[in-house]
Image (cartoon, rainbow, N blue to C red):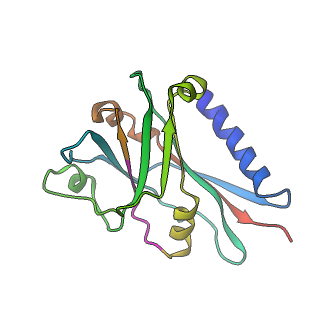
Amino acid sequence: MRAKTLTIMLAILGIFLVGEKARADVLTISPENTAIMAAEGDDWTRVALEFDVSGMELGEGKGVLWAYLEWPIIDNSPGEKEFFAFPIVASWSPEQATSASGSVVRDADPVADWLLSSELKQEIGSVLRLDLRYLVSDWGSGVRGNYGIVVAVANIPSGVLESQLGNARLVVGFGSLGD
């Protein structure tokens, strides 16, 4: 319930931040493909997520006003959680992502990060929120191919995330700025 309230509050804040003349349509998109990726020999858990953003009506003065990945994660382990999002640069399948011999090709540099401190976790719960505005805008305009993102996190085991993959949502506000 707190995650839903936080989503509504952030959507209202997003409208306020882009200006009072802004009008935004909001899409909430569930992932089309998900996979816990094969381990890479370190302490990071990596998740591949792919979203269909074809429902955005862009062009003719319309653009992405905000976009974020929202993912409530039930995790009772103590300590800070740091998350990173890397754009996937080639098509992939869940089978390929989970295979020890397969790989999901991604950019080396993250496009977003989120530090969930112990204090913030007490305040809002275990909610991942990654700002993906510029990446989603590039997907919508065709500047970059939309193959999804890899979310990397330390200190949350893959088994904890596996049953929660379907809880991830891409929330996109798009529209045009006023005159």
Inspect this view and state whether residue 1 appears. no
Inspect this view and state whether residue 87 appears. yes
Q: Is residue 117 left or right of residue 18?
A: left
| Residue positioned 43% across, 71% down in the render | 145
**Front-lying residue, 170 or 43:** 43
Instruction: Give the magenta part as a residue range.
Output: 144-151
- The image quarter containing residue 75 is top left
Residue at far left of view: 101
Which quadrant of the rendered structure holds the N terminus? top right
Q: Magenta stretch mostly in which secondary structure?
A: loop
In percent of width and height, residue 22 lies at 80, 60
**Front-lying residue, 33 or 115:** 115
122 relative to 65, above or below: above
81 relative to 177, above or below: above
In percent of width and height, residue 97 lies at 24, 53
Is residue 131 within the magenta segment?
no
| Residue positioned 62% across, 34% down in the render | 4
| Residue positioned 47% across, 60% down in the render | 52
In percent of width and height, residue 8 lies at 69, 39
Q: Is residue 178 left or right of residue 162?
A: right
| Residue positioned 57% across, 66% down in the render | 137
